[in-house]
Image: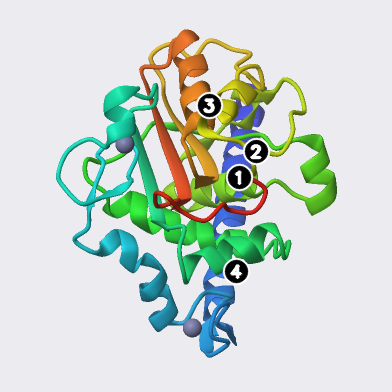
Amino acid sequence: MADLSARCESGHARLAGMRRRLKLAGRACLARIPSACGLCQGGARGGSLCRFCHAAVLRSMNSDTTRCPICCLALADQGVCADCAARPPAFDRIIAAFDYAPPGDLLIHHLKVGRRFTSAVMLAGMLAETVRDKAPRLPENALLVPVPASKASILARGFNPAAEIARGLARELHMDCQPGLLLRAREGGRQTHLTRLERAASVQHLYDCPRRVDGAAIAVVDDVLTTGSTLHRIAQQFKAVGAAAVYGLVLARTPYPGPKPPGQ
Ligand SMILES: [Zn+2]
Ligand SMILES: [Zn+2]
């Protein structure tokens, strides 16, 4: 009997390994298929950007621009930005793939307004690249948690961009994604025209952390960081249930004063 169950287990493990290898081979094949660049429509592969556009989008974060070490805001001088100095956020650090400015802002527009679901895979790949290269490194055991969208926006768009990006990051970085650690407690309105103070008040009771996460490093995933109010509130809640550190992983960081991203 014991022998039979051991053989079953080894059969399952072999099947799982085969499935994993097939998936990887499938992904490698897809990555080689010629496609049009999502920005210039020039030649690219596997639904990615062409090399020129890829570099142009990531240039803002790869340049020598001085940034706030906490919220990743571009600054004229070294040090912590005025906002983080005046009101230290509850999150430990933000990692952003690019500034919410041309040409990267167009990709966010495609994803959120154009509902281009497939852009999420390419954008998650760009953020994964940034996370891999960023020092100090994100803890390998950090848990990825997407910011939950309202029911209204999921119904309107058909998907939650943050959840798709988190799923892509988990695949690229071999990290654990646990969406159930952060729930939407109520609907809440759009934040587009709210001031910083109004945004802070509007996110006060929006989310809920249903479980303790003692000692865990949490990497909260969102599409765009504007004032940081949402990630600040979420980080406060995660730390209240035991998180040792809370990071924010976002596609784009809005420069100050910057354009308002769609749906913010
Ligand atoms: Zn291009
Ligand atoms: Zn800052």
Q: Residue 157: where, in percent of width, then height?
A: 78, 53
In front here: 143 or 109?
Answer: 109
For marks 1 and 2 on the same chain, the one whose residue lies earlier in the sequence:
1
- Name which residue type carries label 4: Gly
Q: Is residue 50 above or below residue 203?
A: below
Q: Mark 4 points at which residue?
A: 26
**Side of 141 where 176 appears, left or right:** right
Find the distance from the CA under tag 1 to the CA under tag 2: 16 Å
Amino acid carrying label 1: it is Ala
Under 8 Å from ligand 2: the CB of mark 2?
A: no
Mark toward the start of the polypeptide (3 vs 2): 2
Q: Which of marks 4 and 2 is nearer the N terminus?
A: 4
Q: Does the residue labelled 3 lie within 8 Å of ligand 2?
A: no
Disc 3 target residue: 197
Query: In the rendering, at what x and y percent does residue 31 appear?
Result: 53, 75
Pick the front one: 125 or 188:
188
Where residue 255 appears, as percent x and y from the top left, is 40, 52
Q: Earlier in the sequence, mark 3 or mark 1?
A: 1
At horizontal 27% and vertical 62% (from top left) the residue drawn is 62
Identify the secondary structure beneath mark 1. helix
Colour scheme in the image?
rainbow
- Who comes first in sequence, dot 4 or dot 1? 4
Residue 141 picture location, percent across and down: 38, 31
Q: Which dot, 3 or 1, sits closer to the camera? A: 3
Front disc: 3 or 4: 3
Q: Which is in the foreground here, disc 4 or disc 2?
A: 2
Q: How many labels does the image show?
A: 4
Which residue does the numbered mark 1 point to in the structure image? 162
**Callout 3–callout 1 Cβ contact below 8 Å:** no
Up/down of 214 relative to 219, above or below: above
